[in-house]
Amino acid sequence: MNLESLGIDPKWDEPLQAVFDKYGMNTPIRQASFIGQCQHESNNFRVLEENLHYSTDGLMRVWPSRFNSRVVAEAYANQPEKIANKVYAGRMGNGTEETGDGWAYHGRGLIQLTGRDNYRNCGDALGLALITNPELLSMPKGACLSAGWFWNKHGLNELADAKDFETMTKRINGGTLGLDDRIAKINKALEVLG
């Protein structure tokens, strides 16, 4: 696979091939769809952890129910660990803010896995101790495997076969954010893969 022509470091070749084999991504459109979506989600396979550096205004805009006053938002602004513990508390299998689960299980991987339940389910499926070693998702092998697990769980091979990139993007992102960029990346990967 010629990842360099897509601007992807060749260190991803082996982890990607393992995921393609494991999850039946055995056609150019399936592989290109996976690569293109992951490129968009991870800034071209370079960002493997959620960026939680938010200003006061950013917190109030993104999470208005959790930061409903300037005073509250100012107490958390530009403190990623503290922000994660608040916004992910009591959700997705996480404990209260004080447990630190929000930070321990913040978004990691090529398609960012978030929350204790997702880490547990993915880890169980892959045979990885993600609850005790969540940082495994910030390494190429774990980042790829977790994205493949998510891909498989959400039936994305079938959407790739149908070239239904809009529904695919909604399943990954919850909306259509970056749809044009995702499609452009998929098409470029398809061109390279032949």
Image (cartoon, helix red, strand yellow):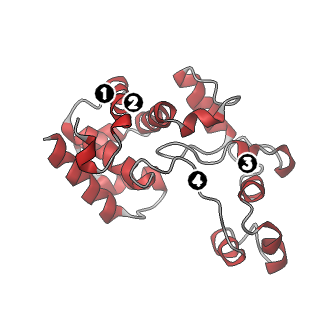
Write the residue at 77% across / 52% down.
85
Q: Earlier in the sequence, mark 4 or mark 1?
A: 1
Q: Which residue is mark 4?
A: 50
Task: Name the image quarter holding residue 101.
Answer: top right
Given contact means CB atoms under 8 Å apart, are the residues at marks 4 and 2 in contact?
no
For discs 3 and 2, the disc positioned in front in the rendered view: 2
Question: x and y percent of residue 61 in the render?
Answer: 64, 75
Residue 131 shows up from this direction: yes
At label 1, counting other C-alpha atoms closer than 10 Å, the crowd grade (few under 14, some 14-19, many 20 or more) is few
Q: Earlier in the sequence, mark 2 or mark 1?
A: 2
**Alpha-carbon distance for marks 3 and 2?**
27 Å
Q: Identify residue type, mark 3.
A: Gly
Q: Quadrant of the C terminus?
A: top left
Q: Which residue is mark 2?
A: 15
Task: Name the image quarter holding residue 127.
Answer: top right
Q: Earlier in the sequence, mark 3 or mark 1?
A: 1
Q: Mark on residue 177?
A: none
